[in-house]
Image (tube, grey):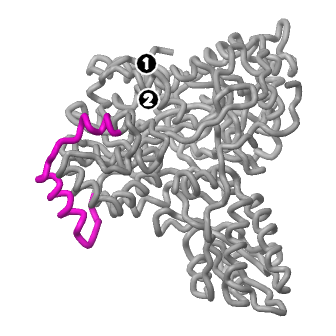
Amino acid sequence: MPEAPTTSSPEEHRRLLAFIEDVTNNPDKFQRRVLAEILTQNSAAEYLHRHGLTGTSAGDPDAFRRILPIVSYSDIQPDILRIAHGDTSPILAGRPISEFLTSSGTSGGERKLMPTIDDELDRRSFLYSLLMPVMSQFVPNLNAGKGMYLLFVKSEARTPGGLLARPVLTSYYKSRHFVKREPDPYNVYTSPTEAILCSDSYQSMYAQLLCGLTQNAEVMRVGAVFASGLIRAIKFLEKHWPRMCRDMRKGTIDEEVTDRAVRAAVGRILRPDPVLADHIEAECSKESWKGIIRRLWPNTKYIDVIVTGTMAQYIPTLDFYGDGLPLACTMYASSECYFGLNLNPMCNPTEVAYTLIPTMGYFEFLPVSLEGDNHNQDLVELADVKLGHDYELVVTTYAGLYRYRVGDVLRVTGFKNKAPQFSFVKRKNVGLSIDSDKTDEVELHAAVEKAVRNLEPFGAALAEYTSYADTTMIPGHYVLYWELRKGRKEVPASVFEDCCLAIEESLNSVYRQCRVADGSIGPLEIRVVEEGSFDKLMDYAISQGASINQYKAPRCVRPGQVVELMEGRVKERYFSPTCPKWSPGNKMWMGKNNGA
């Protein structure tokens, strides 16, 4: 794989675009090379030996395809736990595991630990280096301005064996690739690195927005990782703009920002500017915030955020704040592996298609119609997928994941040369999601079962329930519609509030971190509906073609007719009275320790 460039230039852009042409014209050749490299580099891995890749089979791609099983996280968790507890032998990879990247929760609710090696940072950096050459084909002169990207680090922990465990973006932002990056006119940010790396989310957000406002005339693109993050930033600005205007007038930063490194970094940017402060105040004081991004950052060409999958629910809100600014969705990545790019980043959000870059890992695809069978021979290679078909992505990485089911369902929508392009269809088994949280129906049901015990002393019981992620307000929050069977005594409001909190306490650590530390999810709400509401819901479903013999109430729904039906029958509303307990704990590496 070519090295990531230290800086951008037109010549460098042409070289990187030529690389994209090469790998998309020859995806099969590069995929064979990547698999051979992975098997050679990891030939000493115990996992491969355990499954029969030894002796003459070691490093043999055909043997790999024939005998390596398709796996999920639970299959490799014992090996992960051994590494987490300090076993440094080559269990999964031939090179040392440098840290764990925390992925979204398992069916049991806790974060997954994804192994990584030092080389993976080079691979991720290289994929980032492809973004601006691609975007510059659609938006010229991006080297003449800056990007106001709101980027944040999250909490990290250490495993019992001493390895860091943290989100993939936190790992990248704290790496030399980001902190020590060379000056690049195509990647100049308004946010100082010190503000990005500040672990206090309030101070980080305040400093980054203040610096973005101070340099508003230079901003050519506005972005965050997820759409939800950018909307949260706008809501933060809506609350704190008077303080920021005061700071701009005086050339000083608010005293609530106490981090010395952040204060010093902002101080190098901030100068007294009463004219700019008056302009910001005038715009923010208006009754409507429609088009506020254009009004505050008038030279913005596009908004750069992820709006696929569950983030699509935020498109109308972004359209309101952006007033027609294009929404660019540029990259497809996860904790397991960075996958590819959107080679047409200015397309309509509903038409986003990702081209997987064949050098990032070895990619196979499980036809969705066969996903329950898990037969190795059913896997399809990258160059052999069929237009219009849906597949679950299966990845093999340099860091020691082999035929690992990522959980993303993709649809082949076209081709770039000979390389397929995929739209994101869904994340498997996700019922509710506001931010980076992913709650499935099984986890939600277990949490509800615990919570309804609070009703037992009153003789009341839960007859039926459903839920949805309400993003009409920021931050969004989970809403549960409960239909009750009345008991012998009236249930006090405080008991329903306890039920809300009990559900939150039972949800996974990703949800609780978003709720407590990040503030990106609001208090969970229970809306009690009239008796017979779920009979009405069944009647509606049958009228839409559902079978009366097979009907069961949906546990998680999307905004639409079902929510509207329920809303018309709401009697009472209750919220969690406080935040659930959360700390960067060690549940990720608890469990049976096989060999540590």
Instruction: Name which residue type carries label 2.
Output: Tyr
Q: CA distance from mark 2 to mark 1?
A: 8 Å
Q: Position of residue 566 (x, y in %)?
A: 62, 81
Residue where numbered disc 1 is placed: 4
Q: Is residue 81 on the magenta stretch?
A: no
Q: Which one is earlier in the sequence, the residue at label 2 or at label 1?
A: 1
Horizontal side of residue 21 vs 7, given as left or right = right
Q: Position of residue 18 (x, y in %)?
A: 38, 20
Circle 1: is it few (<14), some (14-19), or many (20+) Cα within 10 Å? Answer: some
Taking depth in this image into account, of 133 and 199 the one nearest to the observer is 199
Q: Which residue is at a point 25% across and 48% down the rendered structure image? A: 213
Q: Which residue is at a point 85% across and 86% down the rendered structure image? A: 459
Horizontal side of residue 500 vs 459, given as left or right = left
Label 1, secondary structure: give it.
Answer: loop
Q: Position of residue 23 (x, y in %)?
A: 49, 22
In the image, is residue 80 above or below residue 298? above
Q: Which residue is at a point 66% across and 60% down the rendered structure image? A: 580
Residue where numbered disc 2 is placed: 128
Q: The C terminus appears in which quarter of the rendering?
A: top right
Which stretch did the figure color magenta?
263-292
Taking depth in this image into account, of 479 and 59 the one nearest to the observer is 479
Horizontal side of residue 365 vs 373, given as left or right = left
Residue 446 in view (yes/no): yes
Residue located farthest toward the top when viewing the structure as drawn:
56
Asked if the residue under mark 1 is in contact with the one under mark 2, i.e. CB atoms within 8 Å, the reply is: yes
Q: Position of residue 169 (x, y in %)?
A: 52, 36
Taking depth in this image into account, of 168 and 275 the one nearest to the observer is 275
| Rendered image quadrant of residue 544 | bottom right
Residue 342 in view (yes/no): no
